[in-house]
Amino acid sequence: MLPAGASAMVASGLFLGAATGLNFGEDVEAFINVPLALGFSTVAASIWATGPATRGLNRLGLLYTVVGLASAVYFPAHAWANAGAALPGVAFAGWLGEWVWALGAAPLMGIGLVLYPDGELPGRRWWPAPVGGVIAVVLLAGANALNALEPTQATFWPTIGYIGFVLLLICSAAGVIALILRFARAPRTSDLRGQIGAFLLAGLLAVGSASLPDGNTVAHLVLALTAGAALPATVASAVVRHRLLDQRAVLAARLEAVSASRQALVTEREDERLRLRRDLHDGLGPSLAAIGLGLRQLQADVPDAQQPVVTTLADEVQRAVAEVRRLCDGLRPEALQELGLAAALADVAERLSCLGGPAVALEAEPLPPLPAAQEAAAYRVLMEATTNAVRHSGARQVAIRLYWDEGLHGTVEDDGAGIAPGVPEGVGLGAMSDRADELGGRTTITRTRTGGTLVRLWLPEVLA
């Protein structure tokens, strides 16, 4: 809507000028408003279309909307006012052109400089600059508008307008200083310096164009259009850059929050599984075992006719005890529960080495206390990787390493044939990746220099 409206007003100004024989070459600086109107209305529309996520982008959206619309209004008003008595409303157009210009160029100078390029101030102490810029724009526009109306004309309005102009120059100077400070503070490798440098050059081009004497030449017209187009072009580049960075930051924050929530849920789930295992292992399991033992002892004391019933009940209880043990091991492996992560993996290495395949060795450094979820995930991933290496790699040696370095690290490396390129990921490999992903970690599988397979596991430190 904004670009369409600005384009319509610019087109109407061109039509009025052509219809009334107005020679815009006599007032070339009016043409600066054409690229300002089209450029800043487009920038503002792009900001509003994506839904600004920060206060800075909202400020820029409002600022560029005012600049774009004011520049668009001024151009046909200027043409209308200079059309003579041939059209009605010439007096109104002249009055409009007397003050609406202040809403076009002035906000860019008094407010836009200090807010460039992301809509944020360089620091908290810089708030007087944009506030002064708003006051300066209001004084300029208001004084000119009231002085141009016959009922409200007064000798003090030009003085107030002059005060507003001086205040605008002061705020503009503060904005230039802010830009220089931003440029100096920006890292040398940052493209922020390029954004600021391009904006300052565009501003100097616009000031230089406006300072030249009026001239009815093509060179003057080209310079005016170039100067007017350079400002919105550099602003558009900076806004796109910072809007993308802003959206990327918001997305990263949301992903981080989702990851943290997922990690908390997995940790809570594993703690609940541990509690349930303890209840089954220390409560229900012993109770069922005691019932089974009692039934076995009861077999010698019951009549022969009831022997089958007691035997069946005892067998059923024995199966229930086995099922409880299976459930406990599924909730949390018994070796992990009884021995801890390093000792449980050592037990895995010892058992697999006895199968007549490759030799499996474990190297484990001292680890800090780990949450139950991390221990379970690391145990299952490394055990799965080790089992795969023993069964499928054709290796002679398999090495497991476990250590802590800003998170839990584990590796399983073999000297076997490795995974052939293009082989689809199996269920086991997918499960290994999923277990790490749940805790915000990662599992990678690569080939070693000797052609074997290297599985790497990393689980981040869980902050309390």
Image (cartoon, rainbow, N blue to C red):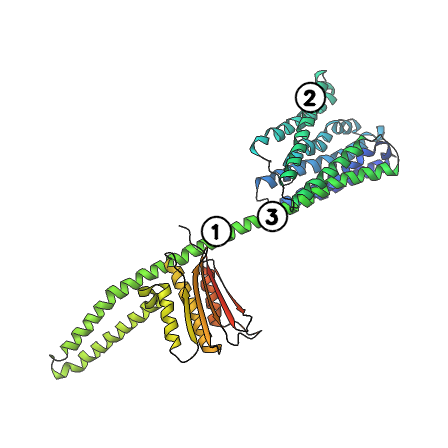
Name the side, left or right, on which 224 lies relative to 180. Answer: right
The three-letter code of the residue at mark 1 reads Ala
> With respect to residue 417, does 459 lie above or below?
above
Kindly identify the amino acid type of the residue bearing the numbered disc 3: Leu
Q: How many marks?
A: 3
Marking on residue 426? none
Residue for badge 1: 257
Q: Quadrant of residue 220?
A: top right
Residue 284, image quadrant:
bottom left
Q: 278 or 315: which is nearer to us?
A: 278
- Residue 445 appears in view: yes
Picture coordinates of residue 408 (x, y %)?
44, 59
Q: Which element type, helix, strand or loop, lies under badge 2?
A: helix
Q: Residue at x 26, y 72 (%)?
A: 321
Q: Residue at x 75, y 35 (%)?
A: 204
Of marks 2 and 3, the one in the foreground: 3
